Amino acid sequence: MKGIIFNLLEDYIASNHGEEAYERLLARCNLKTGEPLLMVAPGTYPDEDFHEIVRQAAAAGHLPVDDFYRDFGRFAIPRMADRYPDFFAPFHHPKDFLKFTGMVHLVEVKKLYKDAQVPDFTCRDTGPDTLLLRYTSERMLCRLVEGLIEGVAEYYNVPIRCRQTRCQRRGDMTCEFSIHFAEGSGRESADGQRSR
Ligand code: HEM
């Protein structure tokens, strides 16, 4: 997993419990990486280390791991928008941004980090206020995806209902999310732009 994801995880844990608590937590983790405090955005670190930090942090906060991932996803989106503003600026509605998620990873993330092992996203536009989003990855981080979808909706200030209809962890080939955006939230304004 790329260092940028570890950096976001550090920000999340430190913003809830403080930087010192994060460092104490790292000291308790059984990590493969030799120099965990030097994790840098373009570097690549073992997925097991990511899971270990999440496991320890969730336990310390008395949260189920799935809830931790979801909350982390919601936290991460505004930070990603600060870091990659150009990816968010062209869009005014979460549906349009989410339709771009596959391209972000396959094209933009790959341009930034050639060795990234990106997840696969495909979308089916099922109606004016609905979207089916499919996520496929060996990492099977669907609770994180759910939190990220919610974070995107909050970022563009559009209420959603999101239901997971397929899950790789239950043996399906892909994870599928059926997303319903607040009615009329996607109405286009006179200049063809969606209103936020
Ligand atoms: C501007 C927006 C985004 C950027 C720049 C971005 C970038 C990245 C990067 C760099 C990674 C690490 C890949 C690796 O470690 O090899 C990653 C992983 C991931 N991204 Fe994004 N991402 C964005 C938006 C999203 C959104 C909206 C979702 C979900 C709807 C999402 C879901 C994930 C997941 C679940 C992973 C973990 C890796 C996996 O499951 O295989 N990302 N992303």
Image (cartoon, rainbow, N blue to C red):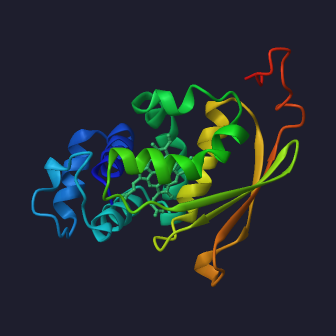
Nearer to us in this view, 59 or 102: 102
In the picture provided, is 48 more to the left or to the right than 65? Answer: left
Residue 72 in view, yes or no: no
Nearer to us in this view, 155 or 136: 136
Nearer to us in this view, 174 or 109: 109
Residue 93 percent across, percent down from the top left: 71, 32
Residue 49 percent across, percent down from the top left: 27, 66
In the picture provided, is 144 more to the left or to the right than 50? Answer: right
Residue 137 in view, yes or no: yes
In the rendered image, the residue lying farthest to the top is 190
Residue 45 falls in image quadrant: bottom left
Residue 11 percent across, percent down from the top left: 34, 40
- The residue sitting at 57% across, 56% down in the picture is 145
Instruction: Establish if 6 lies above or below 76.
Output: below
Instruction: Establish if 187 lies above or below 105.
Output: above
Residue 62 percent across, percent down from the top left: 45, 60
- The residue sitting at 86% across, 28% down in the picture is 187
Q: In what quadrant of the picture does the C terminus appear?
A: top right
Count numbered badges in the picture. Answer: 0
Instruction: Establish if 27 lies above or below 89.
Output: below
Q: In what quadrant of the picture does the N terminus appear?
A: bottom left
In the rendered image, the residue lying farthest to the bottom is 171
